Amino acid sequence: MFDNLTRRVSAALGQIGGKKTLTDANIAETLREVRLALLDADVALAVVQDFMDRIRQRAIGAEVGASLSPAQSFLKIVNEELMVVLGGASEGLDLNRQPPAVILLAGLQGAGKTTTAAKLGVWLKQREAKQVMLVSTDVYRPAAIQQLQTLAESAGLSFFASSIDQAPEQIAKDALQAAKRQFVDVLIVDTAGRLAIDDEMMREISKLHGHLDPVETLFVVDAMTGQDAANTAKQFGEVLPLTGVILTKADGDARGGAALSVRQVTGRPIKFIGQGETIEALELFHPDRIASRILGMGDVMSLIEEAEQKIDKDKATKLAKKIQKGRSFDLSDFRDQIQQMNNMGGLTGMLDKLPGMGNMAETAKARVDQQNFGQLEAIINSMTPKERSFPDLISGSRKRRIARGSGTEIQDVNRLLKQHKQMQKMMKKLGKKGGMTNMMRGLGGMMNQGGRPF
């Protein structure tokens, strides 16, 4: 997300470097480029105009500090104003109510409400230690109820069963009673959507809101719809007392117009952002961190939080001790590091959060096929435990067997073994600094040499 915007804004801000003072004249071209970048990112025109006016007023005023260069001062102003556009402080869920607290999800068909209901349930379970129940009142879309039930079961969440011959309001009432009986902390209600806003849908969801009195009414919107997302959210907000927005499919949106428009157009905060297809791919929306990423300054805090949540600390500790003792970095270790990196969004997802790594992330996206990592794992999984521990044992006949078992070619097996040897040498030299860090450096080195991770 924000790839194109980050590249263009960073280039525009680079024009300020070397200026001794900030004047209306020498920031004019930079502001013009920033304005065009925002418009191309599909940010709403009113939002762009207000944003640019505030930057211009501050940049040529008395806010340029003596301790900062003009370029640094200008970057600081842009960063602060971006945070204002995105919503200022991060706003989580307000669950301060006698359980069960009800969260009502609204939105158009195809926005990802059902998947988001499950993702939000997982987030509450893992981050807030809440007992969560899911229920679907979508009696119109084929298999909608079954889809939510399957997601709930896979995530270990409670599910209230309903059927298409029931009225949505009755399903909601029954689910609320069941949640009370089972001492559930949070009840998440998935509602029906339409391909476009219509009066019938609005009346139905308004009735549901009246029956449930939810503590949170969240509008779920596809980030790839750009400023249309903000306009649709505004229409929903005229019927429902929305408390926030969840942006979905943000990983597929290189522009970022929805994120930069929704808050200002609706007056409601973006509370969560979905980036990925896994059941855990939902994050709190932090305006300060998003602003930092747009300006190419990375998002180290989010990377640290992801590492704390998703890296297997036992495996990482064992690997570090193993390398420090001079033992070999074998193919099982290689596979574990790839899996942990994938849990954190893959190589490109991690580089995207590191300061100054914007260009490297772009290079990685161009050169790395994430499916290749899956093939790499398949090759290693086709080996015997002894072969993984002692790769030198892998002869021609063994390579043929491994290739057949993994659905690859012998040259693919040879390439993996060659790159594993390179990784062994790097890990031996850099082992004292941590397995995951070394893995990232090693893969980055392969890319800089024009190679492929597989």
Image (cartoon, grey):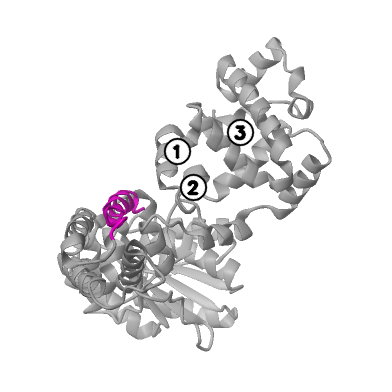
In front of the other: 313 or 94: 313
Q: Is residue 344 left or right of residue 18?
A: right
Q: Is residue 408 left or right of residue 321?
A: left
Q: Is residue 138 in view from this perspective?
A: no
**Residue that sits furthest to the right in the current view:** 325
150 w.r.t. 75: above or below: above
Q: Amino acid at mark 1?
A: Ala
* The C terminus - image quarter: top right
Q: Main secondary structure of the magenta part?
A: helix
Which label is found at residue 351? Answer: 2
In front of the other: 211 or 228: 228
Label 1 to label 2, Cα distance in Å? 9 Å
Which label is found at residue 377? Answer: 3
Identify the residue under disc 1.
Answer: 364
Local secondary structure at mark 3 = helix
- Indicate the position of residue 382 as horizontal and vertical percent values: 66, 26
For marks 3 and 2, give the one nearer the viewer: 2
Q: Which residues are magenta?
A: 1-19
Q: Quadrant of residue 225?
A: bottom left
